[in-house]
Amino acid sequence: MNWIAIRMLTGDAQKFYGLLFGIAFSTLLITQQLTVFVNLIERGASGVYNEPTADVWVMDEVSRTTDVNFPMPSTALDSVRGVEGVEWAVPHLRANASVRTREGDLEGVTVIGVDDATLIGLPARMAEGSADVLSQPDTVIIDDVGVGNLFEAGQSPIGVRLELNDQRAVIRGVADAIPSFTSQVSLYTKYSQALQYVPGTRNRLSFILVSAADGITPQQLADRIQADTGLRARTRDQFARDGVDFIIENTGIPINFGITVVLGFIVGVAIVGLTFSLFIRDNIKQFGALKAIGVRNGKIRGMVATQAGMVGLIGYALGLLGTVGFIWGNSGSAFFKGFYIPWEVPLISLVAMIVIITITGWLALRGVMKTEPAAVFR
Amino acid sequence: MANPFKNLSFSRQILPALAVLGLIVAAAFISGTLPNRELTEPEREPPRATGDLANSARIAGSGVVEPSSEVIAIGTALSGLVTDLLVQPGDFVSQGQPLFTVDTRAIRSQLAEANSAIAEAQAAISEARTAQTTAIRQLDLYRNVSDPAAVSRAEVIRAEGDAMAAGERLNLARARLGAAQARASSIQTELGRATVRAPMAGQILSVDIRPGEFLSTGGGGSQNIIEMGETRPLHIRIDVDEEQAPRVDLGAPAIVSPRGAAENQVSASFVRAEPVVVPKRQLTNTAAERVDVRVLQIIYALPDSARENFRVGQQVDAFIPATGDEG
C-alpha cells in the first residue's frame, strides 16, 4: 500500500522535486545559518579554547573575557599557587598593542605572553616552526589568521621584523589557532618579553592559568580560589561561555541570525505546505478511489505519512549535504577557519523539518479525511 | 519487482538511497570535524607542590639563589692599573688568598727612596758618631792639661760646645733614621694594600677586570670588580607576599625547583626570615619598578646534593608549608 503512496508521490516529478527543493532549501537555510551563528559567537571563546591545558582561569574581579581584562599585581600568581588543590599555576598576559610593519602599516595586535619556562598558553599545534623558537631573543609567534591579515598572499612571515612599542620583534613561527571574534592578529611571546612589548601600567598579569590537582573538580577549585584569594576564577567552560555571552550581549548577531533561521522556517512551511497541499488535493481522486475499495482512514494516514517521510528524508539529506559542502568548501578561508557543524544543529533542523512536514501533512490530510468515496466520480 | 534493475527508478530508488548515503556522509563529516577541546597535559613540567604539600595548606613564593654569605663585591684599596689577576670565576679560594694586584711601580720606587733615606740616615749617624768621638777626645785632651796657662778658658768652652753639638747631631741622625724606617714601613704597608686578598673562604662568582684595566677607589659600587661568596651551602631568598606572610610555617622545609626545570625539586631547610619586610624587587626584568607590593624574605639552605642544579642568581619557585589556621 505504501508503495502505491510513493508511486503517487513520484508520479508528478515537478511537484515531487518542488517538495524536495522546499525541504532541502529550508533545511539548508536553518542548518547553515545556525552553524555559522554558533561558530561566529564561539569565536568569543577562541582565546580559551586555543589554550589546551588549563582547567581554570583566574583573573581580576572585573575581568569579563579573554579580551576584556584588567591586570593584577604579580604576587597574585603566588597566592594562587598557594591554594590547596592547585596542581600548577602559570602567568598569562593578554594585551592589545599596535605593530608597525616593514611597509609602515599600522595593525592592532593582541600580544599574548605565555609562561617563560613551560610555554603553557601556546596553542596546541604549530602551523610552521616549533614552539622552541621562543627561546631565541625577541621572538614572536604569529597565528595563521594573522599571517593573512598582516601579509600579502604567498609572502612568508618567517623572519619578518616588526616594531612593537619601540622594540624589535621577529616572527619565527606560525601557530595553528582559531581566530578571535575580531580576527585580530595574535602574537605569542614569552611573558617576560610581552612585558616589554606592551606599553605598561604598573600591573601586567592578565590571567593565571591553573590546573586542578587530582581529586578536585575544576568547579570546586574555582570556588576555592575565589574564596581564598578574592580573585575571580572561572572554569574553562564557564570562561568560554563568558566570551560567548559577551558577544551575544554586545552585538546584534543573535538577532540577525535568529531572523534568518525563522525566515528559513517560514519559507520551508510556506513552500512545502503549499506544494504538499496542492499535491494531496490533486490526488484526492485517487484517495477517493482507495476509500471506495475499502481503505480505512488510518491506512490513508499511513500513506500520507510515508509520502511526507520520503520527501522529508531526501530533502533533509540534500539540505544537510549542502551545509556540509558549504563548510567543507570554505574550510580553507580564514574567515571560516575552525568552523564546524555542532552535532546539535542537524538535530535542530531535523526537528524543524519534522515540524514543517507534520504541519503541512496534517493540513493536507484534513481534506482527505473528509473525502467521500464518491469523490472519485466527480 | 522481478528484476529491480529493469524498473530502476531514479526518484523512487536511487534518490532515497542517495539520501541515506548522504546522511551517512554528513554524519561522518560532522563527527569528524567536531573540534577537539580535550584538555591535555603541558609538554614541559610546570612547578607544582608535591608530596605532603600537594594537599595541604601551603604558600608559594619565588626567589633567587644566593651564596650563604650573600654576595661580596670585592673592592680595591688603591686605584691603579691591574697588573696581575690571580683567580677565575668558579675558583674556590681560602681566606687571605691573593685575588689581584694593582700597579706597584710607583710604590716600589718610593720604597727605594725610603731605603736610600735609611742608608743616608745611617751614614749620617756614623758621621755624627765620628765627629762626636773627635770632639770628646779633644775635650778630654784639654781637660787633662794640668797647666791652666797652657789652654785658654775660651778654648775649653769651644771644645765642650763641639762635643755637645756632635752629640746632638748624632741624636738628629738617629731620629732621621727612625723617620726613614717608619716611612719605609708605611710604604711596605701600601705595597701590601696593592694586593687584594680574599676576605673569607668562598667561591669566585664573577670577575669583571682584566690585567691592564684601571681601577678606581672612588664612586663606590658602580663597578663590581670581583664578586665572591660562600656557596657551600647555597641559600635561596624567597619572597612571600606580605598578605600571605602571617601564614608561613617558619622553620619548616620548603620545596624548591629552579625556574624552567620544575622536575628538579629539592627540599630546602629553613635558615631565617629577614626581620625587614621590603618592597618586592622586580624579578621579571621589566624596566618599570613596582613598589606597591611588599614581601617578606625568607632564607632557606639548599642541600649539597642540589648544587649542580642551582646557580647563584637563578630564579626559583618555592612552596612553603603554611600554618593551617586560615583558608
Image: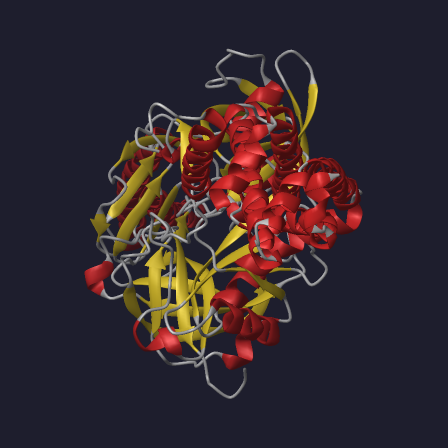
Which residue is more in the foreground, B214 or B38? B38
Which residue is more in the foreground, A84 or B321? A84
Identify the image quadrant of the C terminus of chain A.
top right
Residue positioned 80% across, 42% down in the render:
A252
Looking at the rendering, which quadrant does residue A262 occupy? top right
Counting from the top left corner in percent of width and height, residue A107 is at: 68, 24
Residue positioned 47% across, 32% down in the render:
B12
Indicate left or right for A209 with A265 as reference. Answer: left
Residue positioned 51% across, 17% down in the render:
A160
Relative to A169, is A92 above or below? below
Counting from the top left corner in percent of width and height, residue A337 is at: 54, 31
Counting from the top left corner in percent of width and height, residue B171 is at: 37, 51
Count of marks placed on residues: 0
Counting from the top left corner in percent of width and height, residue B31 is at: 43, 44
Q: Residue at the left extreme?
A: B305
Is residue B298 in view from this perspective?
yes
Looking at the rendering, which quadrant does residue B48 occupy? bottom left
Residue positioned 51% across, 80% down in the render:
B247
Relative to B287, is B249 above or below? below
Is residue B80 in view from this perspective?
no
Q: Residue at the bottom extreme?
A: B325
Indicate left or right for B309 with A277 as reference. Answer: left
Which residue is more in the foreground, A152 or B29? B29
Give the color scheme: rainbow, by chain, secondary structure or one colour.
secondary structure
